Amino acid sequence: MKRLFRIFELSKSEQRVVLILMFVLIVFAFVGYERRVHRVHARTPTVLEMQTSPSPEQTEEEH
């Protein structure tokens, strides 16, 4: 079993590489999340856009 865990024994330079890669992956995930969240908010219509006044054709049909 000890032999199996030797794969996790890293030198200082290897530890730095792993930490940098983890940091880069976290940054990419955070940037992707922020872009998705802000894109959804930018596309939602405002209250004014959702409330459209009826056109003359619609009012004539209702009468």
Image (tube, grey):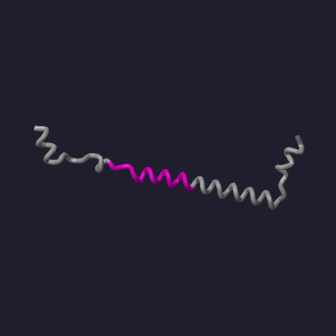
Left/right of residue 34 with respect to residue 51 in the rendered view? right
Task: Point out residue 25 in the picture as x, y percentages from the top left corner.
Answer: 65, 55
Task: Point out residue 37 in the picture as x, y percentages from the top left corner.
Answer: 49, 50
Left/right of residue 10 with respect to residue 62 in the rendered view? right
Left/right of residue 1 with respect to residue 32 in the rendered view? right
Range of magenta residues: 31-46
The verdict on residue 20 being magenta is no
Query: Residue at horizontal 50%, vertical 55%?
Result: 35
Report the residue that reaches farthest toward the right: 2
Toward which corner of the image does residue 59 lie, by quadrant?
Answer: top left
Q: Main secondary structure of the magenta part?
A: helix
For this rendering, which residue is in front, 1 or 12?
1
For this rendering, which residue is in front, 4 or 37?
4
48 shown above or below 20: above
Left/right of residue 29 with respect to residue 10 in the rendered view? left
Query: Residue at horizontal 13%, vertical 40%?
Result: 61
Question: How many numbered marks appear?
Answer: 0
Toward which corner of the image does residue 10 lie, by quadrant?
Answer: bottom right
Query: Residue at horizontal 88%, vertical 40%?
Result: 1
Task: Name the quarter where the C terminus is drawn.
Answer: top left
Task: Point out residue 50 in the picture as x, y percentages from the top left corner.
Answer: 29, 47
Report the residue that reaches farthest toward the bottom: 13
Query: Residue at horizontal 14%, vertical 46%?
Result: 57
Task: Point out residue 56 in the picture as x, y percentages from the top left corner.
Answer: 13, 47
For this rendering, which residue is in front, 62 or 16?
62
The verdict on residue 37 being magenta is yes
Report the residue that reaches farthest toward the top: 63
